[in-house]
Image: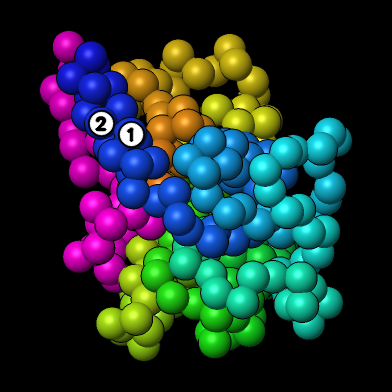
Amino acid sequence: MIRLKLILRYIFVNSINNTDSLNHLIIGGSRGIGRALVEQSIQAGQKVTVLSRTSPSVDIPGCDWITGDASAPDNFLDQLPEQINALTFCPGKVILGPIKRLKTEQMLEAYKTSVLDAFTIVQALLPRLDGSIVFLSSVAAGTGLPSHCAISAAKSGLEGFAVALAADLAPKVRVNVIAPTLTPTEMGLGMVGGDKMIPLIENRHPLKAIPSVEEIAGTISFLHSNSAKSITGQVLKVDAGLSKIRLNDR
């Protein structure tokens, strides 16, 4: 665990050191992973623009905050930088429920907020993009989990879109995806029943831990950095080994 933390710190520090000249547009930065990424990017000296459907409760120095919806880019395009070197797309409504209770409208909403909104904003920004795009998926896209049909379908669609987009935009723009396991955000904790469930959930992961929002944000920073300039079309699973490793009981 100590070695893992040292490696993550090394990645984060080196990512911060070579991203300080970026124009970074973060979509969905009001809370959770997006908010952690906003804070890290400001700390790194990046020129940060945040698009969110809600305004922050307090002013955040060091960034331009735009209130708007990614599905309607015409409403805010004139407020965005002329060149965007890093685009991070965090939204995607988490809809949980067993198949017998899911409604068609819920499946469509999950797909719209994860895939169609990503498509809409990327298409609108094409003339301005020059660098890197990172989408936020979920370990549920490739791991069968109960009550995850809607989010699994939506995030699988997002991952497919991202890989094809990487081919479309090469060599000018790199495109990658982060697929984390549960992270202790307000939304994540609400899904599982609060802090009291964390030890049980951590025990299901081979590393006996789940990543913090800062770890996920640091990995996004790495993918936007020059340290990752040969990485594109990839889905990076930050999931403490959940999707690939099975351990003997001990």
Drawn side of residue 89 relative to residue 108, left or right:
left
Q: Please name whichever residue, 98 or 93, is drawn nearer the observer in this view of the structure.
A: 93
Image quadrant for the C terminus? top left
Question: Does any portion of residue 49 appear in the rendered image?
Answer: yes
Q: Secondary structure at mark 1?
A: helix
Q: Is residue 196 above or below residue 220?
A: above
Q: Which residue in the protein does label 1 denote?
A: 13
Magenta span: 224-250
Name the residue located 34 percent from the left edge and 36 percent from the top edge.
12
- Image coords of residue 63 (percent x, y): 68, 48
Q: Which residue in the protein does label 2 denote?
A: 10
Q: Residues within 10 Å of mark 1 (few under 14, many from 20)?
A: some
Name the residue located 27 percent from the left edge and 68 percent from the top edge.
232
Whether pointer 1 and pointer 2 mark residues with C-beta atoms closer than 8 Å, the reply is yes
- Image coords of residue 99 (percent x, y): 59, 57
Name the residue located 61 percent from the left edge and 53 percent from the top edge.
48
Q: Please name whichever residue, 93 or 72, is drawn nearer the observer in this view of the structure.
A: 72
